[in-house]
Image (cartoon, rainbow, N blue to C red):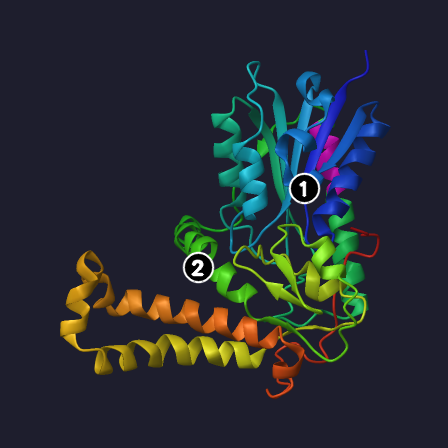
Amino acid sequence: MQKTAVIYYFTGTGNAFRLANQSANELRTAGYTVIVADIAGKNRNVKAVIPPEHANAELIGIISAVYGFGLPQLTAKFLRNMPKSKLGKKCFVFIASAGNEGVCVLQAAIHLKLKGYKLIFARTFTLVSNWIMFETLPDKETQDKIFAQSDTLMKEYMKSLIEGGKSVVYSRSNILLVAVFAVVYPLFVFFGRQFLGKMFTVNNKCNACKYCYNHCPSKTIKWLGHRPYWGWNCQQCFRCINLCPTGAIEVSVIAILALIIGAVAGPIIFLKFVPNELLDYTGVLKPFLENIAVLHLIFAIIAMWLMQILLANKVIAKLFPSWYVTKNKPRYKEPHFRP
């Protein structure tokens, strides 16, 4: 009787997509019927993403990118909402990382355990980074070497998995570093990714094609007039900036400066010029409005929200200097990826 496997993946620019298709091909060669499903597909509706074959599948695969040293929020949400397995269905987890997988495998293992699945195999693959906000892409020769090494490991790992091997590598780092990642990840989830997402803007190459708007996995990109506007649910997948057909999306230095100035100067001005008597009228909110940490956060949010509104206006945006962190930086997507 032919076995069935269902592989779910989440990707920004194609690395996890590459791993999903490669693992699927290895399973098909071994005689499996394989269904590959995009976690961000079907408008991110978990019930719609999960195919009927899931219920009777002998093997489930979870393949994901890593953002902020942990699982992307769309992957984590998917795992939280997966149907329960009463029979301890076998699972494998592959992580596509350009550096360190952080707590990704540990997260996935916990979610799967809570849902009744049995994690039997997990590995991390080192692939090309798409985080061009802070990194520069390696040259073509280096990228080819990275892909070749990953391809070799894929065949090795899948051979072991298909032959019944059980091996879960939770992290390639020591326990102290993992503890640091466990602290950094929540900060990224609740603060970092939102503020970093607000730093995106477009240059004069934008032709209002809406490619970014139509292909944003989290649908956080809205459309104001003839320009994109980034909301507060950016995954940091970097699909928009890397796949923009005209290379129009950039990371704005002006937005970064607005964040710094707003977060630093805002609380100082507020506490200096708002009288204590006026704060008395805020009632239960007064302790928060007197807390410097809370004020830093409030004014950072206001600054980034206001700057996004201004930069989304084509006329007003021209008043600001064209300073971009990503100016002239090469973009990246996995060669075969088409969202």
Label 1: which secondary element = helix
Residue 65 seen in the current view: yes
1 or 2: tag closer to the N-terminus: 1
Q: Position of residue 336 (x, y in %)?
A: 84, 52
Left or right: residue 155 compared with residue 83: right
- On the image, numbered disc 1 is attached to which residue? 43
Task: Identify the disc placed on residue 191.
Answer: 2
Q: Position of residue 106 (x, y in %)?
A: 49, 39
Over which residues does the magenta segment extend? 154-161
Residue 10 vs 62, above or below: the answer is below
The residue depicted at 47 percent of the width and 53 percent of the height is 189
The CA span between labels 1 and 2 is 24 Å
How many residues crowd around disc 1 within 10 Å: few (fewer than 14), some, or many (20 or more)? few
Residue at horizontal 77%, vertical 47%? Answer: 18
Kind of residue at disc 2 = Phe
292 versus 81 height, above or below: below
